[in-house]
Image (spheres, rainbow, N blue to C red):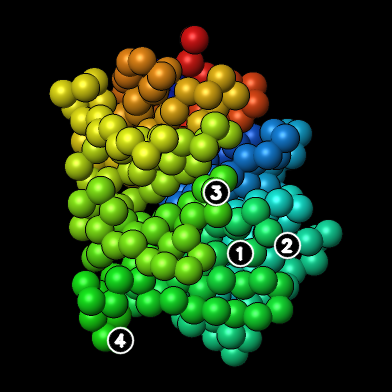
Amino acid sequence: MKNIGLYVLLIIFLLLLLSCEKNEIDKEIKNEPYDKTVTSITIHDNIVWVGTLSNGLYKLSGDSWINYTTSNGLLSNEITSLLLDNNEHLWVGTKMGVSKLEDENWTNLTTDDGLFSNDIRSLDCDKENNIWIGSNRNRTTKYDGTNFTSYHVNPEASGDPGMGHIHTITCDLKGNIWIGSCISGLSKFDGVSWFDYVNDLNIFVTSSICTEDGDVWIGHIGGAYNYFDEVWTKYSEIDGLANHCILCIDIDQQSNIWVGTKKGISRFDGTSWTNYTVDNGPFNDYVSSLACDRDGSIWIGNNNGLIIFTPNL
């Protein structure tokens, strides 16, 4: 009986050992950033860029991930935002300033160079390839490649020296700059004049995007808003959204609008909404970042990592 007990213990030990080895191999295959806290995702020509909270930047080209950190030239391993400009150069927003990757070389910009703040929260570029940089203290800075021009967004609402963060910036086809803040809501800058509390949005604006047709989509804690031909349309749970709190927005190759919410993902095909829940082990329905690739897959990130979802459309 004692020998049988020893055999059983030995078998259990071997099974546990094999299980540990399998988990380690699986981790190597995943090769990050699937188990990291993902803050931002951008995709171009099926090259996937993923920003994380504390592990730097990841690039997927083919089947291999490349990890960029401060040891490679990044200002910080805490990534807040990503942008591919009109020349396909990558801009990385961090809590220590902005890093630009061009031909595998990094250029870093901080307050020493002309930024208003190093606490970067959002990025976009306009038709002239000016880089618009959103930061804390409700400031946005335009960088034309040489000069920095900073603006205090809705100073009446944010106060002096400024409270709030610029969480999203979108440059539309007409040259307007749409700016979303947690304190002052939605503002628009047409290059000359500022317009605040646009469409009465006076609190947390989280995300925005402009389509190829010129539609502007705004993500807000109260729903998704579409602006086209000077008409605003609001969508909420009553209209079919998974949840009214919108955290991120992207558009796929078929012009479907995808929004991440606190309770899953919603897709708008121009007529109606279709909702998807995220059920993948520890990954939950709080979708804080997403991006659509050209093959129809949706890359989804949150504080539990990164997963890939391919819907049947």
Marked residue nearer the N-terminal end (4 or 2): 2
Which residue was labeled with disc 4? Answer: 161
The residue closer to the viewer here, 16 or 284, is 284
The residue closer to the viewer here, 38 or 297, is 297
Left or right of 296 in this view: 196: left
Q: Is residue 10 above or below residue 145?
A: above
What residue sits 52% from the left and 37% below the top?
A: 214
Do the residues under discs 3 and 4 have CB atoms within 8 angstroms?
Answer: no
Q: Residue furthest left?
A: 238
Tell me the SS state at disc 2.
strand
Mark number, residue 279: none
Q: Residues within 10 Å of mark 2 (few under 14, many from 20)?
A: some
CA gap, disc 2 and disc 3: 28 Å
CA gap, disc 4 and disc 2: 32 Å
Where residue 138 sits, quadrant-wise, is bottom left
Q: Residues within 10 Å of mark 3 (few under 14, many from 20)?
A: few
Tell me the SS state at disc 4.
loop
Mark 3 is on which residue type? Lys
Which residue was labeled with disc 3? Answer: 174
Which residue was labeled with disc 2? Answer: 101
